[in-house]
Image: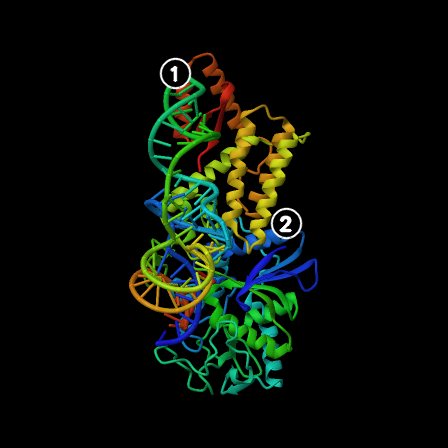
Amino acid sequence: MLSLYNTMTRQKQEFTPLAPPFVGLYVCGPTVYGDSHLGHAKSYVSFDVLLRYLRYLDYKVRYVQNITDVGHLTDDADSGEDKLQKQARLEKLEPMEIAEKYTASYFRDMDHLGNLRPDISPRASGHIPEQIELIKILFEKGHAYQAGGNVYFDVSSFPDYGKLSGRIGDDQKSGTRVCSADDKRNPRDFALWKDAGEDHLLRWDSPWGWGYPGWHLECSAMAMRYLGETIDIHGGGLDNVFPHHECEIAQSTAATGREFARYWIHNNMVTVDGRKMGKSLGNFTFLRDLFEQWDPMVVRLYILRSHYRSPLDFSDEGFAGAKSGLERLLSFRSRLGSREAGVPAQAVLDLVEKTEAEFRKSMDDDLNTPEALAALFKFVRDGNIVLGGQPSEGDKYEMAALLDRLATGVLGIELTSGSSGGSLEDLCRILGELRGYLRKNKLFTEADKLRNDLADAGFSVHDLSGGVSEVTPDI
RNA sequence: GGCGACGUGGCCAAGUGGUAAGGCAGUGGACUGCAAAUCCACCAUUCACCAGUUCGACUCUGGUCGUCGCCUCCA
């Protein structure tokens, strides 16, 4: 039974969907005004594993992740410049060109990391009518007020505000930098609609004049549009708990009178070399740059070696360790081959069954991927012992199937090239046979030249027992 | 100032009221033409520190020190 830590209740809870077997999963997506960084990687890999595990458990999941292409400001919620508009100015492009460019960049990076595409990636700019409609309802129910061309949510009308984040005080204490807009009744009130003049490139007509939606509104509108008034799981980064998710809860619940999300899941943040990764610190690590040095699967394994609710520090030493671990998995998977099914030995069946049970037990416990990986690495050791004996094709097939089901299927760690026919794998197999032939005939000079040439070309050679050699591409 | 998380071997990282998974690195051995891979063995009497609860705590409570995050754009 899967249990998940719910930020709202501050404890692990058994997960049961509202309407089994269907699950509605909403995760706050990126604001597309720049390339994705390590923080995005940790967050979206974490939720990708949640998605994959839910599907492994046979839930029918609809995964919605928004693309924010309007509405977030460079400063606080109520002043500053639209981030896309600012970037558009810097790159001398249209805001929508910026959105397209960085949406593509985001998907490219996430594809490399092995994240499954969301079922729906709704754009905020494409759901302005839904957002306006939501504001109208909030007006009707007395939760919104207008000040000039601006519309605000009246937090005093929603007593539960602050429940998720634990910020239940009436006001912000001194020491915080709250630069409230002058026309708000209360500093905690937040914008539902912002007035915008002609200098604002992204703006729409509304009952309150030309403007654009508040930065929390899109998630409420789009989540409810595609997943209904109550969604099963709402996820995002820990930094979104306040104010973003707090505001989402307020406006959604106030509008529908129903619970907005049943499970709130938040992943922790990343640091780089022990320090917060921030624009102002200049240590932003963009994925597109990182992938030139480390294989995306190394990054993915790195992320999954720690728990999603733990903060994660990235360092070169850590990447190197993750790379070695990945090589161990790849090497084992490679040896299992892609043969046909057969009848496996009972001992292999037992091993597979035990491994899967341990894996599931760990994943059931709030997605404990470090422990799940431990089960897989133990399996690799035992599997290598099996391979050292006289395994049947059925033995190999059974073990390969397990690895593909758990490591690749659930954790998303790709261990095979995936291509079929005329593939690199075939070429490697032939070259391995060649080296084996040379060694058997004690043509060591030629055998070593082949090994050296392959090394220069980015391939590793491993000599197995029985005069067999294998060739694998480096990562 | 407010809220919260965390301090486990050289590095990373799980975990349990009854005595420490796994990965990386390292050491010794087997195997090997050599190297690598693989396998075997070794590698924290100890889980920041100090009290307390308990038959017993690393795991519970209180305190101290330290690190980090959020409260502002950020996943």
Alpha-carbon span between mark 1 and mark 2: 50 Å
The quadrant of the image that shows the C terminus of chain A is top left
Residue type of the residue flagged with mark 2: Tyr
Q: Which residue corresponds to mark 1? A: A445
Residue type of the residue flagged with mark 1: Thr
Point out the residue furthest to the top here.
A441
Does A77 sit left or right of A364 as displayed?
left
Image coordinates for residue A185, horizontal then vertical, percent: 47, 87
Which residue is nearer to you in this view: A169 or A50?
Answer: A169
Image coordinates for residue B17, horizontal then vertical, percent: 51, 55
Image coordinates for residue A119, horizontal then vertical, percent: 62, 57
Task: Please tell me how many numbered marks the rendered image carries.
Answer: 2
Give the quadrant of residue A421: top right
Name the subunit of mark 1.
A
Element type where label 1 sits in the image: helix
Q: Which residue corresponds to mark 2? A: A56
**Residue drawn at point x = 45 percent, y = 44 percent:** A298
Of mark 1 and mark 2, the one earlier in the sequence is 2
The quadrant of the image that shows the N terminus of chain A is bottom right
Which residue is nearer to you in this view: A468 or A312?
Answer: A312
Quick check: A337 above or below A164? above
Name the subunit of mark 2.
A
